[in-house]
Amino acid sequence: MVKDGFRFALPPLVLGIVLMFFHWWLGAVFVALGLFVLYFFRDPERQIPSEPGAVVSPADGRIVEVVDEPLGDRPGKRISIFLSVFDVHVNRAPVGGQVRGVEYHRGRFMAAWNEKASLANEQNAITISAPAGEMTFKQIAGWVARRILCWTRIGDEVRIGQRIGMIRFGSRVDVWLPADAEILVRRGQHVAGGATQIARWQPMK
């Protein structure tokens, strides 16, 4: 459980218990809301793949895009993951290495499954220098999500699958891989953050 969850869940839970003495059905609604918030902030342990060159999913959700797309002047591939309000929203590092960049950009709050959300929405881009090279992934706010949390800073050393942040209440995460990476997932597939291997990316020889 992410500790912030209790801060959001306790008010409706307490209010709901009080209201049940006067209007049980209204109290039940608030209690249910509080329980759902606790469910949303769950943070289960995951079995992290140990295969050399493994790239894991940074988030739970459904793959909505796998496309060829450069990042800056680097050719590459983008994998986009849509997180519904029912998915775990803790984000994890797709590879291990040193954090070289953390860039926050204000933007719009389009629906996270919209392909334009990758560029137009409020987002936080994290770049990690891994043994095979640099990889960038983005925490992207959606129509419901209005708060991006990042728990890592430039210079930090992170492990593959390590918890690095969270996006509250529905969102999207994009991962950019170099063109020579082997993609292991397909559009429509459901992935688990830190547990599902989405690509194989070996250092160049």
Image (spheres, rainbow, N blue to C red):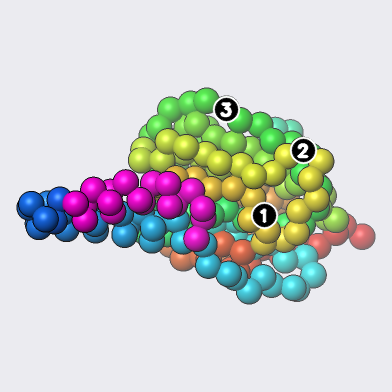
The number of discs equals 3
| Mark number, residue 141 | none
Which percent across, then down, holds residue 167? 49, 45
Give the quadrant of the C terminus.
bottom right
Residue at mark 2? 154
Marks 2/1: CA distance? Answer: 14 Å
- The amino acid at mark 1 is Ala
From the viewer's perspective, tell me whether residue 102 is left or right of residue 57.
Answer: right
Is the residue marked by circle 3 packed among few (<14), some (14-19), or many (20+) residues within 10 Å?
few
Please provide the residue range marked out in magenta: 1-18
Magenta stretch mostly in which secondary structure? helix
- The amino acid at mark 3 is His
- The amino acid at mark 2 is Ile
Which circle's residue, 3 or 1, is located before the other in the chain? Answer: 1
Residue at mark 3? 105
Which percent across, then down, holds residue 163? 63, 56
From the viewer's perspective, tell me whether residue 198 is left or right of residue 3.
Answer: right
For the view shown, which residue lies furthest in the right direction?
Answer: 205
Element at badge 3? strand
